Every structure is written in C-alpha cells, then in structure tokens.
Amino acid sequence: MSVANDRIAAPAARPGQTALYQFFDDVDRLLYVGITDDPKTRWARHRQYAATSWWPRAARVSVDWLTGRDVAAAAELRVIRTQAPLYNSGGAPSPLREQAPGETPCPMVNMQRFHEATGGGFRPPGRPWRNMDQAVAETLTADVTAGRLRCGNQLPRVAELVNRFGVSTNTVHRALRRLASAGRVERQGVGSGTRYFVTLS
C-alpha cells in the first residue's frame, strides 16, 4: 500500500484480527511500527500527534493482519528490537545496556528531541532522564520567565507540546497538572475543549 503525506487510506478493521503496521520513508527506512484493531482511528491519531515528526515522511506502509492482540504485540516487539524503527521508543532495547543477540538499540529520536527542548536538564548519572513531566513543566515556566509566554496567553495545545518535546500525551497532561497545582496556569473547559492559560508571569 502506498501513501503520500496526509493522503493515507487506512484499511478497514477485521473482526478478531489485529493489524501489525510498519511505516517507511522514501528510501525504505523504518519510521514507526505499531499494532491496532482499528487502523482508521489509530492512523488519525498519528496524523495529529506525529505531524511534525515522522508522519510527513511516510512514503509506504505495510500491514499484516494477525490473529489476536497478544500475537501482534509479540511481533511488534520483535520488529522494534531487531529493526530499530526511528520513532519508536517503548519496548526498544536500551542503549545503556549490552544488547542481546539480534537486538538493535533504539535511535532515540524522541529522546534527542526531549533533550533539546528541555535544555538537557534532568539527566542523572547512568539514565537518559527522570521526571519528564517535571522537565516539561519547568521548561514552560522558563518560557514565561523569559517572556515567550505572558500572563493571559494560552499555552500551546497538547498535540503541539507532544510534538515539541517528543513525549507522550500522558506526560504532557502530568506536566500541565503540575503547573495548574502550582498556580502557574489555569484550566478552562473540559474534554477536547480544555485549554490552559498562563496566570503568573
């Protein structure tokens, strides 16, 4: 199946089966591997949350339908650990330990983006990071201190923060809760309409 930027036709779901999908760029480098029971919904999320990373680079996708999510998850893990997709991090072999036969360390593209976006902080000896949500929260606080965000400004949306920091939506939500608890931002709205505004400059 060929793809071109945002014009991606996801296959229809197959009851009782789970899709193992792999996105490649135009020189056949593996960008991302995942599994899903509903490709249409899953790829819509990729289109949103990977808009500034790997999604625009996707040129080809392969889809294999497997029986059962456990079988698909095991296949996904094998691909991550042996083919080192550029934008997967979960399940990838750590570059900080000796590799098992056939394993390839994760390229850590998202780790690099996180490191760059947070100024390289929060790196204890022997570990790539700690308290990622704290790092995101303190980086946004630094934006306020530096005048890049001012009192009353709306913070970037969650998807934008995910793309900026290379972290998960859960990490961003934890960072926003930290800021709200500290009185630095105010939450308005609910659900998908939730927005955060700077309350302290």
Image: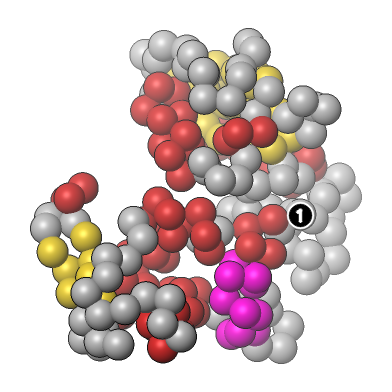
* Vertical relation: 193 (above or below) 178: above
Percent position of residue 193, x then y: 17, 50
Which quarter of the picture shows residue 111? bottom right
* Dot 1 crowding, Cα within 10 Å, few <14, some 14–19, many 20+: some
Locate the C terminus by quadrant.
bottom left
Q: Residue most toward the right? A: 101
Q: Give the overall secondary structure of the magenta segment.
A: loop
Name the image quarter holding residue 147.
bottom left
**Residue drawn 65% across the image and 29% down it:** 58
Q: Amino acid at mark 1?
A: Pro
| One can see residue 127 in this view | yes
Stretch in magenta: 114-123
Residue nearest the viewer, comparing 120 with 81: 120
Side (left or right) of 163 relative to 4: left
- Give coordinates of residue 191: x percent, y percent: 16, 51
Q: Is residue 142 above or below residue 194?
A: below
Q: On the image, numbered disc 1 is attached to which residue?
A: 107
Residue 29 lies left or right of residue 64; in this view the side is right
Q: Left or right of 152: which side holds 134? A: right
The residue lying at 61 percent from left, 19 percent from top is 4
Q: State which quadrant residue 123 falls in.
A: bottom right
Q: Is residue 121 magenta?
A: yes
Give percent across and percent down for residue 74.
61, 37
Residue 4, above or below 135: above
Q: Residue at x 53, y 63 (%)?
A: 165
Q: Give the residue displayed 68% in from the left and 20% down from the top.
A: 60
